[in-house]
Amino acid sequence: MKNKLTHLAIIMDGNGRWAKERGHIRTKGHEKGADVTRNITQYCAEHPTIETVTFYAFSTENWKRPKYEVNFLMKLLNAWLLNELDTYHKFGAKFETVGDIEGFSPKLQETIAYIKRETAHHTNVTQILALNYGARDEIAKAASRLANRDEEITEDSLGAELNTPYRDIDLMVRTSGEQRLSNFLLWQLSYSEFYFTDTLWPDFTPEELEDIIDQYLHRERRFGAVS
Ligand code: FPP
C-alpha cells in the first residue's frame, strides 16, 4: 500500500556553498534560496495530499554566524514576507511559525504577526517557517510548563504542549549532502522517513521534490511493527 504524505519538512541547506561556487558572497545564496522556498511552497499548495510544509529557516544556533549575515537574513526575512503576501494569497497558503520569535526585532515580529493574520483563512497548504527554532529548547520548555502546572508528563501531554501541535512529519528532506538533524523537530521526526540529497538548496526544484516523494510513497513504513 502506498504511504500518504501530509506533512513534509525541509532543511534548506547549502546556500553559502552555492554562492561561493559562483564567486558571490554567501548572502546571494540566501536570496536565491528564498525564491526556491516560494517555488516549493507552490508545489505543496498544489499537491493533492500535502497539508503542511515546514521549512527550517533560522535555528537557535544560527545567531553564531557573522553579524552581517545574521542582519542580512533578518532583513531578507522581513522584506520577503511582506513581498510574499500576494503569493500566499495566490497559492492559498497560510503562514505559520515555530520557534521563539520574541528573539527578533519588534519590526520583524510585527511583520510576522501581520502575515499570519492576513493568511489565516487559507487552506491549500500551511507553510511553517521554523524561526529561531531549536528542538531541545522546544521540548525542555514544554516539559517545564507542564511541571509548573503540576501536570503529568506523558507522551500525549508533552506532544500536545509543544509549540508545533501539527501532525507528525511523514517525510524530511535535507539538501546539500549533509546528513544530520541539526536540532530540527526531534520529537515530530520520530517516525519520519528521511531523504538526503546532494543538491544545494538554491538548485533544488519541484521536479526533484516530486521524484523524492515518488520514492517515499513506495517505502515501507512499519512504525516499529513487522510488515
Ligand atoms: C542554510 O544554508 C540556510 C540557512 C541557514 C538559512 C535558510 C535561509 C533561506 C533559505 C533564505 C531565507 C529564507 C526565507 C524563507 C526568507 P547555509 O548558509 O548553511 O549554507 P552552507 O552550508 O553552504 O554554508
Image (cartoon, rainbow, N blue to C red):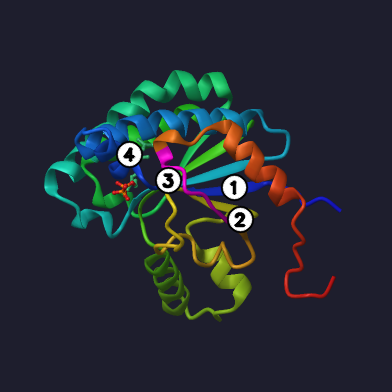
Q: CA distance from mark 4 to mark 3?
A: 12 Å
Label at residue 12: 3
11 vs 161: above or below = above
Q: Residue at x 28, y 60 (%)?
A: 61
Q: Say which label, 3 or 2, has the lower sequence index.
A: 3
Magenta-drawn segment: 195-201
Q: CA distance from mark 1 to mark 2?
A: 6 Å
Secondary structure found at label 3: loop
* Viewport quadrant of the C terminus: bottom right
Secondary structure found at label 2: loop
State yes or no: Cβ of the residue under disc 4 lies below 8 Å from any atom of ligand 1. Answer: yes
Residue assigned mark 2: 169
- Front: mark 2 or 4: 4
Q: Residues within 10 Å of mark 4 (few under 14, many from 20)?
A: many
170 vs 20: above or below = below
Residue assigned mark 1: 8
State yes or no: Cβ of the residue under disc 1 lies below 8 Å from any atom of ligand 1. Answer: no
Q: Say which label, 4 or 3, has the lower sequence index.
A: 3
Q: CA distance from mark 4 to mark 1?
A: 24 Å
Decide: marks 1, 2 in contact (CB < 8 A)? yes
The location of residue 48, given as percent across then percent down, is 73, 34
State yes or no: Cβ of the residue under disc 2 lies below 8 Å from any atom of ligand 1. Answer: no
Q: Residue at x 82, y 50 (%)?
A: 2
The location of residue 89, given as percent across then percent down, is 52, 21
